[in-house]
Amino acid sequence: MIDTVAFSGDYTKLRIIDQTQLPNALVVRELMAIEEIERAIKTLQVRGAPAIGVAAAIGLSVLARRIQTDEMPAFLRELRVLAARLVAVRPTAVNLAWAVRQMTQTAETAQNTRDALARLREKAEQIRQDDIAACKRIGEAGSRLLFDDCGVLTHCNAGRLAAVRYGTALAPIYAAAEQGKRIRVFADETRPLLQGARLTAYELHEAGIDVTLACDNMAASLMAQGKIDLVLIGADRIAANGDAANKTGSLGLSILAKHFDVPFYVCAPLSTFDADVANGAQIPIEQRDPAEITAAFFKEPIAPAGILVYNPAFDVVPHTHITAFVTERGICDAANLKNLV
Ligand code: MRU
């Protein structure tokens, strides 16, 4: 499969796989206006913490080319306005703010606007390449947790579609499969937007991995039957104490895993760790459009008109429920996070 996020060949556009069209069609879009990039992130055309970070970095590089001034102070002012607009689109995934900060800091070191454009392009491509390398290393480290014929439960999509390549929580599965291990994956469908059904089931099936789709409320019975040896999920932001925000439903899964004594792993690159946030209660949780719950993909109503809706995009898994974190620096539990980040 092509990379989820990249520059267009001439570096003038952000190129993404439009994930709202999957699994029915593989549509690639090229974006160059701020409104298009904001919309792509908001509507989850591009989604998953690492992927939106890389998309924002490339997006800023592309947008900077259209700033019409040769004066550095004015250039930086406009760049910061664009950066703030992108960061505001999705508040939970810290990779977005992290990548945008890397980009504005890079521009601030430039001598002139021409130099700034060159540095921004180079930095965005470096952030993209670093994501590929980090996910590969997460895969190698995490594959050691997987054994032949083991059953893995995953939630949402933390696969190659959520990053540039490989993904985070699915990277160990791809690596283990390459090593010849047979892995049985159970993918939660992940209400309300069905990233598990539409994306995880799609990408694993495409890759020839044994994947079975289950509704979110079936995880308990899968664990009760002993079909799940471990849970692998991604994260949108990990606080200094190890509390991890991830797709809504992750907290419930972690409670089930504790109950059934199933190891629970969070796979994430270091760009997802936020040392400035002490614990999960301080992580901002994005509230999304009620229509995501009341209408099947905003078309057919599936709930009474005007019903009150609770639609947080993420919830927080307490560090006490997390067996360990799998990162590009290896596997580490919450007590030892300080040595890692
Ligand atoms: O709302 P989404 O689809 O962007 O949510 C994505 C998740 O919750 C992922 O699990 C998380 O970003 C980790 S992706 C490697």
Image: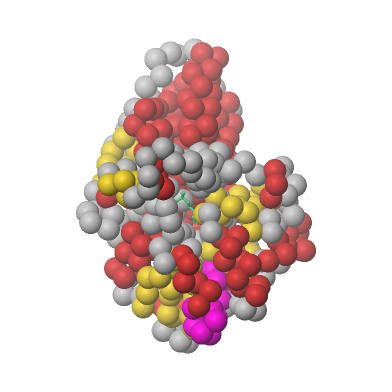
- Front one among 197 and 89: 197
Task: State which quarter of the image contains the N terminus.
Answer: bottom left
Residue span colored magenta:
222-232
The number of discs equals: 0
The x and y percentages for residue 150 are: 49, 83
Q: Residue at x 53, y 23 (%)?
A: 80
Q: Residue at x 24, y 48 (%)?
A: 27
- Front one among 327 and 212: 212
Looking at the picture, the colour scheme in use is secondary structure
The x and y percentages for residue 83 are: 51, 28
Q: Is residue 256 above or below residue 267?
A: below
| Left or right, 301 with reference to 321 | left
The x and y percentages for residue 268 are: 57, 58
Quarter of the image holding residue 206?
bottom left
| Left or right, 181 with reference to 9 | right
| Residue farthest toward the left in the current orientation of the protein | 25
The x and y percentages for residue 62 are: 38, 31
- Front one among 29 and 66: 29
Q: Is residue 102 above or below residue 293?
A: above
Q: Residue at x 44, y 32 (%)?
A: 60
Q: Is residue 277 above or below residue 177?
A: above
| Residue farthest toward the bottom in the current orientation of the protein | 148
Query: Is residue 248 visible from the viewing direction of this image?
Result: yes
Query: Is residue 41 visible from the viewing direction of this image?
Result: no
Q: Any magenta on residue 230?
A: yes
| Left or right, 90 with reference to 45 | right
| Left or right, 175 with reference to 231 | left
Quarter of the image holding residue 261?
bottom right
Q: Residue at x 53, y 54 (%)?
A: 248
Task: State which quarter of the image contains the C terminus.
Answer: bottom right
